[in-house]
Amino acid sequence: MPSPFQQQIQHAIKNESLQSALDKNAANRARARESAYQSLSEPFETLRQRAHRVREDIMGDLPTLLSTFIDNAEAGGFTVHRAADTIEAQGIILNICREHRGTLVAKSKSMVSEEIELNPFLESKGVRVVETDLGEYIVQLRDERPSHIITPAVHLQRSDVGKTFQEKLGIPYTENVSTLTNAARKQLRDTFLKADIGISGVNFGIARSGSLCIVTNEGNGRMVTSLPPVHIALMGQERLVRDLNDLALMLSLLPRSATGQKMTVYTQILNGPRLSTDPDQPQERHLIILDNGRSALRDSSLREALLCIRCGACLNACPVFQEIGGHAYVGNRGKHTPYPGPIGSIVSPGLFGQKTFGHLAQASTLCEACYEACPVKIDLPKLLLRVRAGGLAIPPTAKDRHTPAGLNPLTKLTLRVFTWLSKKGSRFHFAQKALGKLGSLISLKGWIRMPDFTGWGISKDLLQPAKKPFRDLFPSLQKELTIENEKFKKAGDWKKQPRPDDYPQVLQNTTDQFRQELEKLGGHFIPCSPHTLPERIFECIKEQDTQKIFSWKAPSLLPGVLSFLQEHGINIVHQSDPEIKIGLTGAQAGIAETGTLLLTSGKDRPATASLLPPLHLAVLDAKDIHRTLSSALGDPAVTKTSTINLISGPSRTADIEMTLDIGVHGPREVFVFCLGQ
């Protein structure tokens, strides 16, 4: 009888809707990632090597860094809890809910919460949990688990979402993505405003400052960490960077690898709960740091898996994941793992048990596509082989070459024959020629149908082997290449090829670069002077047919702006109101390479002014535009606030059939009024 894993695979392969959704995800992610890599300031390979060294260094010094991080987080006002396992983490969260009489929790996407099965636990204790990430909200309505660590509803088509919303939300059936997104926005807005507690994950903890970094696109992450009076952050203990320079490196790779963006729409750096001068933000921030097997994993031969930054690139690149999807990754008793794909096939047995999840490592072709895609250069094929050979049971010093465990006799015999043929060149050459001739006899239009008993025949055909081995073709190919090179040299074309020295380096003006990047994101750039600024803002407000705005207070804006607006009949408030269409803020800095605004919390600066209204108007001085993120974060005045918000264009999502839609929970439009000379 097939195992639960094999049953899930067969079910996934026969599901045409799933196959279509997975194919679309893989193709779109690959295109977006390649395009985003082209904008890196250094070659991708150079940056991923550096990121690997940074993460390796952190793993080597993890206990010390973790202690430093906790000390600094507590000094900043976080209440820090250490949880050894799932039961302890669940208990801590339940106690916080009961202490604050919390019955409604607004939650943004967190893989740690999936790991500890938080939602069903809290629901069983009378606490209602609402997922606010669009993809997570969809799968919650369907009573399913996320099928991807970045795109939870990747297995669904828009028709599936339309039927779900019709059944669960009572709206007319539609396949229009914008209509579906707006329906979710309308349903969830009330949850954000009424929630007693907000729960989020953590992308990175910054050891030197004790800060948390959270990245999202839709605005729900900012909502759950800004609106409820109590915020709980869940973090795996390995998710550390040393300082803001390390963070800037990771943020240059994470969004590009995850979603093909230069920067996520919202990147938050939380330094603690609200200060006495802050007009909003939670009064309490709790941080739960989870071990749950990570210490044992760090001391094993699978330690390198802890370098993962949860971008999901290996899932998108994996040919096996592209066929079976995330829901097929189940244990030997049918229990789903929260971590599918190549990295999940290592982390799952490492954290939850080799006996339960060790077989997942067999679901890999070892083609190294995952290794090439990984932004922190984790050697995933090597780790998959280690899991196949016993996982955590292997000492860290053991060699990688082991006889895979649990293989059937036919597979073992096949591997032995292949090994014998491969050890001698003449034997291998003979086998290549024989296979080429055999393939030409049994192939069908260049493909060979595999028998089902191999385990591959369920869904895979093999490409017909080459009729002539490459080693036999090489002499003629080398001769042709030599002839072409001679023709090229004689024609003198090599002299005409451009060299780097032929072109002077042109340094682009940072303001122009900022404008270009902002407009690529769908933002609006409006150049003005201090004299013309009030009038330009007023014109923008009048175009929206409104008389009321939610604004920062006058001391945090250019003098005269608010008084001018009031003189022209604009009603200005400094507290959130669901009916207000426009939020007006300043900006402490801009980042040219990504078109990003940097806003800090503080006196007279309500953070929700840039989040709740559908339109966000921001005033930025051109002299405050930095070329890079690391330069902008180097300003001490920026890092001393309770919250830093990095905003890159309007909020967006592609959670429904990989179709981009704007304005999920945050603003639909962003206008930047840039002050020049």
Image: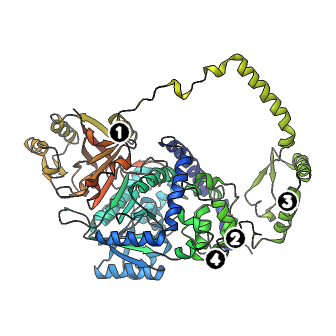
Numbered mark located on residue 224 in the image: none
What kind of element bears circle 3?
helix
Q: CA separation, marks 2 and 3?
A: 24 Å
Numbered mark located on residue 514 in the image: 1
- Quadrant (top left/top right/bottom left/bottom right) for the C terminus: top left
Residue 87: give x, y in percent of width and height: 46, 82
Q: What residue type is labelled 2?
A: Ala
What kind of element bears circle 1?
helix
**Which residue carries the number 4 mark?**
356
| Front disc: 2 or 3 | 2
The residue depicted at 12 percent of the width and 44 percent of the height is: 559
First reached walking from the N terminus: tag 3 or tag 1: 3
First reached walking from the N terminus: tag 2 or tag 3: 2
- Horizontal placement of 609 versus 475: left or right? left
Answer above or below: position of 445 versus 267: above
Q: How is the image coloured?
A: rainbow
Q: Which residue lies furthest to the top in this view?
A: 491
Q: CA separation, marks 1 and 4?
A: 50 Å
Q: Which amino acid does label 1 sit on?
A: Phe
Q: CA separation, marks 4 and 2?
A: 23 Å
What kind of element bears circle 2?
loop
The residue depicted at 86 percent of the width and 67 percent of the height is: 413
Numbered mark located on residue 398 in the image: 2
**Which residue carries the number 3 mark?**
418
Q: Which amino acid does label 4 sit on?
A: Thr
Residue 651: give x, y in percent of width and height: 36, 51
The residue depicted at 47 percent of the width and 80 percent of the height is: 84
| Front disc: 1 or 2 | 2
